[in-house]
């Protein structure tokens, strides 16, 4: 089963590349609309310094915004779990924050933060804050009431109940939200860069689009995908290292099947 999980997606990917190359070589679609895979690859081999120059600010904004989202999201989830009044006040605004497109608040971001990296970080936080907060809060809510009562009857304080029961139980949900946020972070940074600036993958993509350099646009898309998958893999690794008991139990369940 593990081999199939790798081979099937890989075979599908190779098939897509083959069809893409076939369409571009035969000239079915104009090269400035859909470039060939070789043309996209040449962007990486001929101008690697240009891509690296624009990659660094995007990655910095994405990681900074993601870390800030973890801090703010965790504190918000803890506060919502500690007080029902805080939950009733904040929860509707968490939902509202996901209904407002970043482009819609672009003029405000420019007024508040200018064209610097602060606007990009805010865009990342706006997209990543919600899944982290909601994941951790749902993890707190999933704790069994019977377990809480048992620890309370044994004389455990609310702090010990939180540290020994609620927090470990909520970590799987927290990492689920963090995985989603990690994949959103690069995209959010790129969208933030569309607002303006001097460097970044979003700026690079905008300039390439206006110049009809479609191969460069495809190259940027591949870089965005690679960075998103890299951050996702890092979070997955942390998940497996900190929650070994969870995956050990899942492996035992699969082995029994």
Image (cartoon, rainbow, N blue to C red):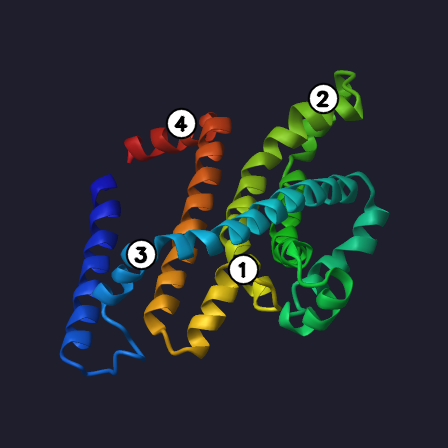
Mark positioned earlier in the residue sequence (1 or 4): 1
Which residue is labeled 3 in the image? 44
- Viewer-side residue, 191 vs 70: 191
Q: CA distance from mark 1 to mark 2?
A: 54 Å
- In the rendering, which numbered label is found on residue 199? 1
Residue 173, position in %: x, y? 57, 42
Q: Residues within 10 Å of mark 4 (few under 14, many from 20)?
A: few
Q: Position of residue 238 (x, y in %)?
A: 48, 33
Residue at the image point whose x is 67% and y is 39% from the top: 140
What secondary structure is marked by label 1? loop
Tag 4 or tag 2, which sits nearer the N-term? 2
- Neighbour tally class for label 2: few under 14, some 14-19, many 20 plus, Cα within 10 Å: some
- The structure residue drawn at horizontal position 31% and vertical position 61%, both measured from the top left corner, is 43
In the rendered image of this protein, does residue 38 appear above or below residue 232?
below
Please report the residue visible at 75 percent of the width from the left and 69 percent of the height from the top.
108
Alpha carbon distance from label 1 to label 4: 44 Å
Q: Quick one: quadrant of the N terminus?
A: top left
Q: Earlier in the sequence, mark 1 or mark 2?
A: 2
How far apart are the two marked residues, 2 and 4, measured between alpha carbons? 26 Å
Q: CA distance from mark 3 to mark 4?
A: 40 Å
Circle 4: element type? helix
For marks 2 and 3, give the one nearer the viewer.
3
How many discs mark residues in the rendered view?
4
- Circle number at residue 248: 4
Rounded to the nearest angstrom, the CA distance separating label 1 from label 3 is: 17 Å
Residue 37 in percent (x, y) is at 23, 65
Q: Is 249 above or below relative to 203? A: above
Q: Residue furthest top?
A: 154
Left or right side of 247 for 159: right
Q: Please state if 26 lies on the left or on the right of 97 as rendered.
A: left
Front residue of this view, candidates 158 and 50: 50
């Amino acid at each position: 089963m593990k081999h199939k999980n790798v081979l099937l997606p890989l075979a599908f990917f190779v098939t897509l590349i083959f069809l893409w190359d076939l369409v571009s070589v035969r000239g079915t679609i104009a090269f400035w609309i859909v470039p060939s895979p070789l043309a996209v690859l040449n962007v990486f081999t001929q101008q690697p310094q240009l891509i690296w120059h624009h990659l660094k600010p995007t990655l910095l904004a994405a990681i900074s915004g993601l870390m800030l989202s973890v801090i703010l999201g965790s504190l918000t989830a803890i506060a919502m779990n500690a007080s029902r009044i805080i939950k009733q006040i904040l929860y509707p605004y968490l939902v509202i924050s996901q209904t407002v497109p970043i482009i819609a608040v672009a003029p405000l971001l420019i007024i508040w933060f200018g064209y610097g990296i602060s606007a990009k970080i805010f865009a990342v936080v706006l997209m990543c804050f919600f899944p982290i907060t909601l994941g951790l809060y749902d993890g707190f809510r999933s704790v069994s009431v019977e377990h809480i009562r048992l620890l309370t009857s044994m004389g455990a304080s609310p702090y010990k109940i939180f540290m020994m029961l609620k927090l470990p139980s909520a970590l799987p949900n927290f990492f689920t939200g963090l995985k989603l946020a990690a994949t959103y972070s690069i995209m959010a940074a790129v969208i933030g860069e569309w607002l303006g600036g001097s460097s970044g993958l979003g700026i690079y993509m905008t300039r390439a689009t206006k110049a009809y350099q479609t191969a460069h646009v495809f190259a940027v898309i591949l870089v965005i995908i690679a960075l998103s998958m890299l951050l996702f893999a890092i979070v997955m690794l942390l998940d497996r290292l900190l929650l070994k008991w969870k995956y050990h139990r899942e492996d035992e369940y699969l082995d029994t099947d």
